[in-house]
Amino acid sequence: MKARQVNKFVNVLETTAHQFKDWYVKNKTPRNDTIKRTDKTE
């Protein structure tokens, strides 16, 4: 029972990590593009 609970917990952590990474990458990329465009314009 404990091993199953640990596996479930690890799976949840991995899923959350992937979701956070995707969210971070999606939010980070547009900001970098905007900063680069602003620097070029200035």
Image: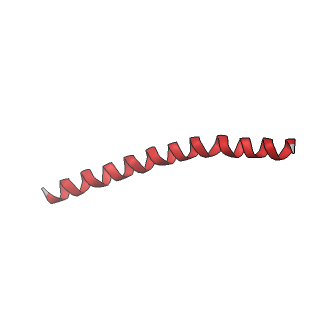
Q: Quadrant of the C terminus?
A: top right
Measuring from the top left, give residue 21's x and y in whole percent: 50, 48
Location of residue 40 with respect to 9 vertically, above or below: above
Q: Quadrant of the N terminus?
A: bottom left
Compared with 20, 3 (above or below) is: below
* Nearer to us in this view, 21 or 38: 38
- Residue at image point 39% right, 48% down: 16
Residue 28 on image: x %, y %: 61, 46
Applied colour scheme: secondary structure
Residue 38 horizontal side relative to residue 1, left or right: right
Task: Kindly identify the residue that appears in the image at 51 percent across and 43 percent down.
Answer: 22
Q: Is residue 26 above or below residue 7?
A: above
Q: Residue, x 38% and y 51% (percent of image)?
A: 14
Q: 34 left or right of 3?
A: right
Q: How many marks?
A: 0
Res 3 quadrant in image: bottom left
User: Residue 33 lies in what quarter of the image?
Assistant: top right
Q: Residue furthest front?
A: 42
Question: What's the residue at 31%, 55% (across, down)?
Answer: 10
Residue at the farthest left position = 1
Instruction: Report whether 20 appears left or right of 32.
Output: left
